[in-house]
Amino acid sequence: MSTRTVTIEIPIPRLTPESACWLLVAAAIAVDLITTQIGLQAGLIESNPVARDALEYGVAGALALKAGAIGVGVACRPLLAHPYRPLIPLGLALPWLAAGAWNWVAITGVLA
Protein backbone atom coordinates (compact mmCIF):
# COMPACT_ATOMS: atom_id res chain seq x y z
CA MET A 1 0.00 0.00 0.00
CA SER A 2 1.43 3.37 -0.97
CA THR A 3 0.60 6.74 0.51
CA ARG A 4 0.12 10.01 -1.29
CA THR A 5 0.39 13.54 -0.04
CA VAL A 6 -2.10 16.09 -1.27
CA THR A 7 -1.17 19.74 -1.08
CA ILE A 8 -3.85 22.39 -1.25
CA GLU A 9 -2.71 25.77 -2.41
CA ILE A 10 -4.68 28.70 -1.06
CA PRO A 11 -4.01 31.91 -2.93
CA ILE A 12 -3.29 34.82 -0.62
CA PRO A 13 -4.01 38.16 -2.21
CA ARG A 14 -1.15 40.61 -2.13
CA LEU A 15 -1.72 44.01 -0.66
CA THR A 16 -0.71 46.54 -3.29
CA PRO A 17 0.43 50.04 -2.30
CA GLU A 18 -2.80 51.46 -3.70
CA SER A 19 -4.93 48.97 -1.76
CA ALA A 20 -3.05 49.85 1.42
CA CYS A 21 -3.73 53.53 0.79
CA TRP A 22 -7.47 52.86 0.35
CA LEU A 23 -7.45 50.98 3.65
CA LEU A 24 -5.82 54.07 5.15
CA VAL A 25 -8.72 56.13 3.76
CA ALA A 26 -11.19 53.89 5.57
CA ALA A 27 -9.23 54.23 8.82
CA ALA A 28 -8.97 58.00 8.39
CA ILE A 29 -12.73 58.31 7.87
CA ALA A 30 -13.35 56.30 11.03
CA VAL A 31 -10.88 58.41 13.06
CA ASP A 32 -12.35 61.67 11.79
CA LEU A 33 -15.97 60.63 12.33
CA ILE A 34 -15.38 59.20 15.80
CA THR A 35 -13.38 62.16 17.05
CA THR A 36 -15.87 64.58 15.51
CA GLN A 37 -18.77 62.89 17.30
CA ILE A 38 -16.88 62.87 20.60
CA GLY A 39 -15.99 66.52 20.17
CA LEU A 40 -19.56 67.52 19.35
CA GLN A 41 -20.83 65.65 22.41
CA ALA A 42 -18.21 67.46 24.49
CA GLY A 43 -19.58 70.81 23.35
CA LEU A 44 -17.18 71.64 20.53
CA ILE A 45 -18.43 72.95 17.20
CA GLU A 46 -17.42 71.88 13.70
CA SER A 47 -15.19 74.59 12.24
CA ASN A 48 -15.55 73.50 8.59
CA PRO A 49 -18.74 75.20 7.33
CA VAL A 50 -19.41 72.55 4.66
CA ALA A 51 -19.00 69.73 7.18
CA ARG A 52 -21.12 71.68 9.69
CA ASP A 53 -23.94 71.81 7.16
CA ALA A 54 -23.54 68.10 6.40
CA LEU A 55 -23.68 67.30 10.11
CA GLU A 56 -27.17 68.80 10.18
CA TYR A 57 -28.12 65.37 8.80
CA GLY A 58 -26.06 63.50 11.39
CA VAL A 59 -23.44 60.90 10.63
CA ALA A 60 -25.24 60.08 7.37
CA GLY A 61 -24.58 63.63 6.17
CA ALA A 62 -20.91 63.40 7.07
CA LEU A 63 -20.63 60.02 5.33
CA ALA A 64 -22.34 61.43 2.24
CA LEU A 65 -19.84 64.30 2.15
CA LYS A 66 -16.93 61.86 2.43
CA ALA A 67 -18.48 59.55 -0.18
CA GLY A 68 -18.64 62.51 -2.56
CA ALA A 69 -14.94 63.19 -2.06
CA ILE A 70 -14.13 59.52 -2.61
CA GLY A 71 -16.28 59.54 -5.74
CA VAL A 72 -14.27 62.42 -7.18
CA GLY A 73 -11.06 60.55 -6.36
CA VAL A 74 -12.26 57.34 -7.98
CA ALA A 75 -13.44 59.27 -11.06
CA CYS A 76 -10.01 60.90 -11.41
CA ARG A 77 -8.11 57.65 -10.85
CA PRO A 78 -7.95 56.64 -14.54
CA LEU A 79 -6.36 59.99 -15.38
CA LEU A 80 -3.16 59.05 -13.52
CA ALA A 81 -0.49 56.64 -14.64
CA HIS A 82 -0.55 53.39 -12.66
CA PRO A 83 2.46 54.14 -10.40
CA TYR A 84 0.89 57.43 -9.26
CA ARG A 85 -2.58 56.12 -8.44
CA PRO A 86 -1.85 55.69 -4.69
CA LEU A 87 -1.60 59.50 -4.53
CA ILE A 88 -5.39 59.75 -4.82
CA PRO A 89 -6.24 57.84 -1.64
CA LEU A 90 -3.29 59.47 0.14
CA GLY A 91 -4.69 62.86 -0.83
CA LEU A 92 -7.96 61.85 0.79
CA ALA A 93 -6.58 60.08 3.86
CA LEU A 94 -3.98 62.59 5.04
CA PRO A 95 -6.34 65.55 5.54
CA TRP A 96 -8.87 63.31 7.33
CA LEU A 97 -6.13 61.94 9.58
CA ALA A 98 -5.00 65.50 10.28
CA ALA A 99 -8.58 66.45 11.10
CA GLY A 100 -8.82 63.50 13.49
CA ALA A 101 -5.58 64.56 15.17
CA TRP A 102 -6.85 68.15 15.43
CA ASN A 103 -10.10 66.87 16.91
CA TRP A 104 -8.19 64.80 19.46
CA VAL A 105 -6.15 67.82 20.55
CA ALA A 106 -9.34 69.87 20.92
CA ILE A 107 -11.11 67.08 22.81
CA THR A 108 -8.30 66.56 25.28
CA GLY A 109 -8.27 70.29 25.98
CA VAL A 110 -12.02 70.31 26.68
CA LEU A 111 -12.23 67.11 28.65
CA ALA A 112 -9.12 67.69 30.75
Image: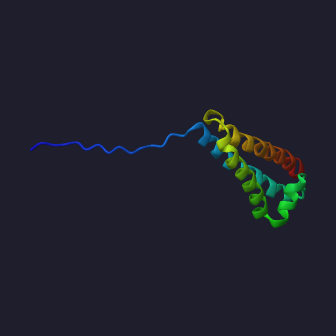
Q: Is residue 96 above or below residue 17?
A: below
The residue positioned 71% from the left and 51% from the top of the image is: 70
Q: Is residue 2 left or right of residue 108?
A: left
**Residue 42 seen in the current view:** no
Compare residues 44 and 87 and report the one nearer the observer. Answer: 87
75 and 92: which is toward the camera? 75
Q: Residue furthest front?
A: 79
Q: Residue furthest left?
A: 1
Looking at the picture, the colour scheme in use is rainbow
Q: Residue 23 placed where, x, y %?
A: 63, 46
**What's the residue at 59%, 43% (across, down)?**
19
Residue furthest toward the top?
83
Q: Residue at x 81, y 54 (%)?
A: 36
Q: Position of residue 54 (x, y in %)?
A: 83, 61
Q: Where residue 42 sits in the image (x, y, percent)?
A: 86, 58
Which residue is farthest bottom?
57
Tally the marks: 0
Residue 38, image quadrant: bottom right
Q: Considering the image in quadrants, where does the N terminus appear?
A: top left
For this view, does 11 lie left or right of residue 59?
A: left
Q: Residue at x 87, y 58 (%)?
A: 52
Residue 89 found in image quarter? top right
Measured from the top left, where is residue 74 in percent x and y?
67, 48
Residue 55's place in the image compared with 2, above or below, is below
Q: Is residue 52 above or below residue 96?
A: below
Task: Residue 112: tell me if it is visible.
Answer: yes
